Image (spheres, grey):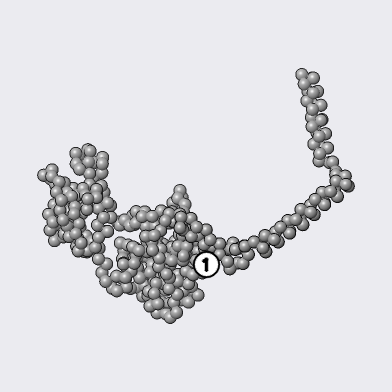
Amino acid sequence: MSEFFQENNENNEMKNTFYREVIERKPEKSSRKFIALVLAAGLMIGTIFGYGMDNFLPNPGRDANNVYAAAVDNTKIVYSGTVSPVVPIAEKVSPSIVAISLKTRSRDFFGRVYEGQGTGSGIIIDKQGHIITNNHVVEGANDIIVILHDGKELEATLIGRDSQTDLAVIKVDADNLTVAELGDSSALKVGELAVAIGSPMGTEYAGSVTAGIISGLNRTVSIGDDSIKLIQTDAAINPGNSGGALVNSEGKVIGINTIKFAETRVEGMGFAIPINEAKPIIEDLINNKKVLRPYLGIQGITISKEEAEEYKLTQGVYVRVVIPGSGADAAGVRRGDIITKIDDKKVLTIEDLIAEIQKHKVGETVKIEVYNQGNEYKTLTVKLTASND
């Protein structure tokens, strides 16, 4: 054992000597001169080579105004020098985005009046001063103040709103408004750049810009009693962003920011109404037209796979009520029928049925397959009427 300790001590001394020798050893003068000459020569060669590369070879990044471009599957990603691609997008779109300040008044049981405040965002869509926002932003508001990009405050009037799509149109009287350019939400692809512009957490943060990507398309999200298909993005959308713009790499509005998942276990899940879905609703609201939606004329519930197996039923939509005078009533749909197909597409849930109906217009016809109480499958032609909502 003593020999083991002795041997290890000797080894440690050798190691200590070795490390100490390396750390403390100093180069001789001749070595230092040689190293200095090598460094100087390397610096000179690098300078000459760099000058030649910079002046005699094409360099698209030398001028800050030049544009770098890359092409991937015919998709052109363009940015300028080292500047973020979000900068020109924000410069183009921000003047078209407004902050909205609201006041609400309500009475309690004893007749006392209470005032509340709220904020949101909006998008200027024409020179006449029409601004689109969310219905939940302006619902119940008595006074609506719009704050332009330059800080100017204007009173706004409510033109129309639609609770089912969560859209609303307000209007201001002003000249020289900067109008946003609307894009095509049907051309979106998952993974492409998305920029959200709005007024999160109050008007003092008006014009805030956040960036991310398109995380998903056609996401079905329930808002109250309604389900709508939305664009999903990880660009930060916070309270007050509602009604603001979601724009693409060309600075075109492709969505209207509406909600986000606010849970501690969820991060970066915001949603926007696709602009293509919003356009016809906005047009109807501006023209003071009732928003007409195709309507089958039934109230139904989903028969799940488990329920179908338990009660020996066909999976589909069970008809609880047929609305008198509706297209379904005229076509012969009866209470207790189970809708299994629409236009040859299988129907498994009430959401499937609604989604297919919404692809049509009022006055168009659809073919539905029902399984009736006589244990028969029948195909019926239903003319879609307008919903009373």
In front: 192, or 387? Answer: 192
Q: Which residue is mark 1?
A: 88
Position of the C terminus by quadrant: bottom left
| Place of residue 42 in the rendered image (x, y in percent of width and height, measured from the top left) | 76, 53
Using a 10 Å C-alpha cutoff, classify the residue at mark 1 as few (fewer than 14 neighbours), some (14 to 19) or many (20 or more). Answer: some
Left/right placement of residue 190 relative to residue 315 reads right
Q: Can residue 107 be seen from the camera position used here? A: no
Q: Amino acid at mark 1?
A: Pro
Question: Considering only vertical position in the picture, is 263 above or below 120?
Answer: above
| Place of residue 176 in the rendered image (x, y in percent of width and height, measured from the top left) | 45, 79
Q: What residue sits 19% from the left and 41% below the top?
A: 313
| Place of residue 177 in the rendered image (x, y in percent of width and height, measured from the top left) | 44, 77
Q: What residue sits 13% from the left and 44% below the top?
A: 376
The outermost residue toward the front is 56
Left/right placement of residue 205 relative to residue 220 reads right
Q: Can residue 250 be seen from the camera position used here? A: yes
Q: What residue sits 13% from the left and 43% below the top?
A: 375
Question: Considering only vertical position in the picture, is 347 above or below 120?
Answer: above
